[in-house]
Amino acid sequence: MCRWFDSAPGHQINTVETDVSTVFLFLHCITGNAAPSGTRQSQSCPGVHVSVTQEKFSMTTARLLKKVCLITGAAQGIGLATALKFAAEGATVIVCDIKQAGVDEAVAQCRALGASAAGFLVDVTQRATVDAVVAKIREQFGRIDVLVNNAGITQDARLQKMTLEQFDRVIDVNLRGVFHCSQAVAEVMVAQGGGVILNASSVVGLYGNFGQTNYAATKFGVIGFTKTWSRELGPKGIRVNAVAPGFIMTPMVSAMPEKVLQGLQAKVPLGRLGMPQEIANVYAFLASDEASYINGAVIEVSGGMSL
Ligand SMILES: NC(=O)c1ccc[n+]([C@@H]2O[C@H](COP(=O)([O-])OP(=O)(O)OC[C@H]3O[C@@H](n4cnc5c(N)ncnc54)[C@H](O)[C@@H]3O)[C@@H](O)[C@H]2O)c1
């Protein structure tokens, strides 16, 4: 059975225009995950476009109004949640991913929320493609205000068993891909006099993790990028920050064995894993002018699992 919840714990609902509960419902339907404690369940799950009218999002308080926001890896999971959250905040959303069907669906969902949206098939490891797409976005939309470097993969194995292919592939996507996109987009942002770059790190990039030599290296590396670029680009009006999620229920994590998931959950003082929209909420804040003095920060969003 699909479930939905009215709002993330502590989330303030504002006045009406775009139906944000539909976003939550959609995310629950695609992930098939349980709602956080203290939330309501529906009788059934009639589909992703079901309108839940009692809770709405005010476009008049939209924090990303008119901002052109490029999100990589936005076909599913945290990237999709971020695309939908940004759409609900009034952004023009540019969805990039290697999955065409997911790109099309994400764009359709953003438009259903009333946002302007476009999608591009982009493999972040391919520099020529990244450059061509960034040029196209600049031509079509005139600017890029926010880049969310969200695309990422895992290929886990203990140090002694990890193959060079596993090592290289994860470095390619999670580190080189972030470098490609940031270098291409930074040029646009410098020319326009400002912007925001947000990088997906992880608690694994803060504390390491068993079986994740390659992944941990990339997520530590992304923090290095963040701190370096915040120094280099800050004087040009560009803020660079990272988010370090704990374990969030997305296809990447739900593929883990049930026993491992239960073990992870037991380490979280809040008693549950995170939901994609709880990371999207932080990206939206960091992307907005409300975070105008936050630069070079790494924000852990893990339910306190590292305490
Ligand atoms: N889920 C978690 O618990 C968690 C925790 C910490 C950090 N993160 C990070 O957050 C980001 C998103 O994670 P998620 O759980 O939503 O992952 P996910 O696997 O659900 O989604 C990742 C998306 O990236 C896309 N992608 C993969 N390779 C790509 C490439 N070469 N070019 C463009 N797109 C590509 C995939 O197609 C997919 O749509 C990742 O960087 C991940 O490392 C996730």
Image: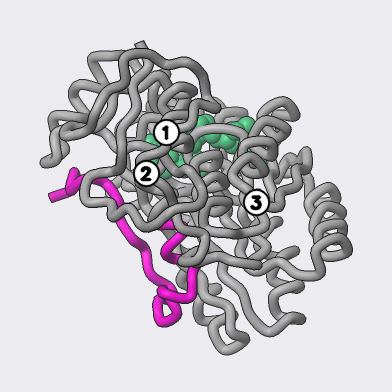
Q: Nearer the viewer, residue 138 or 106?
A: 106
- State the SS at label 3: loop
Name of the residue lying farthest toward the top: 1
Q: Which residues are magenta?
A: 282-307
**Residue at image x 71%, y 49%?**
117
Picture colour scheme: one colour
In the rendered structure, does residue 299 fall within the stretch colored magenta?
yes
Instruction: State the CA–CA distance, disc 3 to disc 2.
Output: 18 Å
Q: Amino acid at mark 3?
A: Ala
Say if 73 sits above or below 16 in the image.
Answer: above
Q: Is residue 34 left or right of residue 175?
A: left
Residues under numbered marks 3 and 2 in contact, where contact means CB atoms less than 8 Å apart: no
**Disc assigned to residue 52:** 1
Confirm whether residue 16 shows in the render.
yes
Crowd rating for badge 1 (residues with CA inside 10 Å; few <14, some 14–19, many 20+): some
Whichever of labels 3 and 1 marks the residue nearer the N terminus, that label is 1
Residue 85 position within the rendered picture, expressed as x and y whole percent measured from the top left:
50, 49
**Residue at image x 35%, y 37%?**
275
Residues under numbered marks 3 and 1 in contact, where contact means CB atoms less than 8 Å apart: no
- Nearer to us: label 3 or label 1: 1
Crowd rating for badge 3 (residues with CA inside 10 Å; few <14, some 14–19, many 20+): many
Residue 43 position within the rendered picture, expressed as x and y whole percent measured from the top left:
31, 14
Confirm whether residue 168 shows in the render.
no
Q: Which residue is mark 2?
A: 55
Q: Amino acid at mark 2?
A: Glu
Q: Which residue is mark 3?
A: 115
Residue 114 position within the rendered picture, expressed as x and y whole percent measured from the top left:
63, 48
Residues under numbered marks 1 and 2 in contact, where contact means CB atoms less than 8 Å apart: yes
